[in-house]
Amino acid sequence: MPADQTFFDPAHPRRGRFDARVVFNRMLCREHFLLRLVIDDTGPSFPQTSPGQFIQLGCRTPDGAADIDALLGAEIEWPPGNPGGQAALRQPELCQRLALLRRPFSLAGRGEDDDGVWIEVVHRVVGAGTDWLSRLKPGEAVDLIGPLGNAFTLPEDKHVALLVGGGVGLPPMFYLAEELWRQGWTAVAFVGAMTRDLLAVDLNENVEPDVTGLPKLSARQFARFMFPSVVTTDDGSAGLKGRITAGLEGVLENLPGASAAQAVIFTCGPEPMMHAVAKLAAHHGIDCQVCLEQAMACGMGTCQSCIVKIDPKMFHPERNEPAQGADAVGRPWRFKLACTDGPVFDSKMVVW
Amino acid sequence: MTPSSPTPAATPPAAAVDLSIDLAGLKLANPMMTASGTCGYGYEYADFTDLSRLGAFVTKSITAEARKGNEAYRIVETRGGMLNAIGLANVGLDAFLADKLPQLRKLRATGPRVIVNVAGHSTDDYVKTCARVAAEPDVDAIELNVSCPNVKDGLTFGTDPRLLRELCREVRTAMAKNVRLIVKLSPNVGDIVLTARAAVEGGADVLSMINTYTAMTIDIHKRRPRLANGTGGLSGPAIRPLAVYLLHRVYRHVAREAKVPIIGMGGIQYWQDAAEFLLAGASGLAVGTALFVDPATPVKITEGLAAYLQKQGCKSLREIVGTLALHGEPPVTPYP
């Protein structure tokens, strides 16, 4: 944050709260939905975004759309003869929404058409908030805060990307694939899930995932850029049986030396998976960027909830920040926030 | 379900209503503040709302030394509420004065008063920190956090009336006279009137209430508390009726007679919530958890309150403070 930051410029927001409407809310696989939102174009324009960034999505009808004042009993014209109903409906407690806090979602895509700027996220039904999201219909209103966090960086001297997305870690890889394609990179995606019905990608009907772990154009989200995928499932119900790292290792072992020197691993998914990917990257001497996740309330750097342990000597070394602790092997760490210091970090900085 | 239906919030704020408040001589343009710990140190929300429209900005708790805070998980949402155990993570007094306060000075120049929240672990610790903060120009008030439920011994000062009275006395004596002393009361006590009275006797100029309720939630599969700290502080709409009740009790039994203004907080999300606190006896209002959902909440509440007060026939917000009439009592004027 620059020290001379000026306060609030509503005409040119870098980030902000935006109203949006549902374009579609399509089931990708069991429990997972691809949600496309078009940003309300009556307000300020939606800021630039990059893969790795996220939004905080309200998981309840937005205040403006719900007419919260009416719900809270301020100005309701009641039909005569229903005083009992009036008394009951005027109780604000009965009108509270299920999910209080917003839920963070990585951007899975962004574009623009005649209706304005659209963004996509993938959500998995795990609780009250995402259950509400799963019932959204085209045209319905939502509101969001964003764009938040930092983004993946594409080093100029590299041009081979290995995208490793496990479960709900896949969405930022969709967005990143498009950006890589735009910048002329080549890429292989590694797509993992527990079972076939939890694979949050569209599988091509005529290109089945390869059971030996050879990259094939099987996942449409990557195949549209001619990026092949290696699909793994824990139970072997689709593609190679095993962990996502098994597929990654197979490709890394056979990566030509020239390619390895130009390769970067980008990963997002469950922490044990990212940790395993980071170890593989270190073993093969390949740069690796991880998109970390942690429970958060605000996403704006105030609640201090989404802490991750980062080596302070590697994270802005010029700041000379002292360590706050050390892991079992004496590696120093300092709490950083996934929302504003991340969510993307160089895997070498992360103290797992 | 249309956004266009007539509501008080939709009407432009009436210029006729005076929203300013007076906290023991400290004038605020409007009653809205940020609740400590939910708004960082000043600039974090600058992209999301016009902070200059706040009545006052209240910082995160500052301690003499920097604190790293608790391990993850630090928060968990419960039905209608949020449980947190951050553990007073903060940059420490020196870094606050060097890096954060200059930002707040810029904000103060745009309107809002600056209130610095201070936490400590001993009387001496509190006194030293408060004295240094109060000596800084552009600090209008200090809010004493004597009731953080998430640090070891954090609750002691806030729950023992005798200790609290002594602490307030020592801090008040050590602070520059022109800086107001606000004492933030804990709800985790048997009778909050006793601690409120102790704070006032010790020299508190203003009371703020309430801090979070100590609470717990359990992961039933792992059979462990869901927060790393075990327990946390409950905030959000879930605690609002509890906060309104305690505030009204303190207003009636301590603050009204002692003429000590109260800053009300605890689950305020909409102007209707804020109006409840005013009627119960609050002069100032702070928004906490709701800031995480929408940093513009205080600004929206200010607009809603202005329209509400006009409908209630009030020329100023101060007229309505504490005008709740319990059943059996004659209505307090002005009353529609």
Image (cartoon, coloured by chain):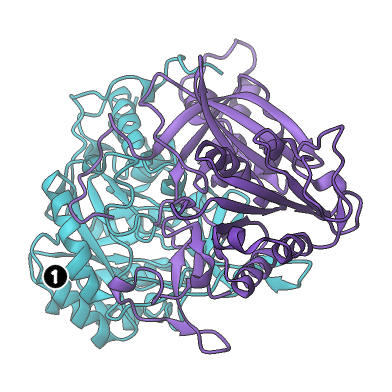
* Residue at x-position 50% and y-position 57%: A344
A76 relative position to A301: left or right: right
Mark 1 crowd level (few <14, some 14–19, many ≥20, 10 Å Cα): many
Closer to the camera, B312 or A22? A22
Give how far across and how far down residue A296 sits, in percent: 53, 56
* Residue assigned mark 1: B134
B306 relative position to B210: left or right: left
Q: Does B317 sit above or below residue A324? A: above
Q: In the picture, which quadrant includes the C terminus of chain B?
A: top left
Give how far across and how far down residue A254 sits, in percent: 73, 62
* Residue at x-position 69% and y-position 29%: A25
Q: Chain of mark 1?
A: B
Q: Does B124 sit above or below residue B318? A: below
- Tell me the quarter of the picture where residue B162 sits: bottom left
Q: Secondary structure at mark 1?
A: helix
Closer to the camera, A316 or B242? A316
Chain assigned cyan: B
Give how far across and how far down residue B222 sits, in percent: 76, 71
Give how far across and how far down residue A113 sits, in percent: 52, 18
Chain assigned purple: A
Count of residue discs? 1
Closer to the camera, A173 or A103? A173
* Residue at x-position 87% and y-position 41%: A208
Q: Does B219 sit above or below residue A6? A: below
Look at the image and tell me whether residue B172 can be seen.
Answer: no
Look at the image and tell me whether residue A268 can be seen.
Answer: yes
The kind of residue on which mark 1 rests is: Ala
Closer to the camera, B208 or B297? B297
- Tell me the quarter of the picture where residue B262 sits: bottom left
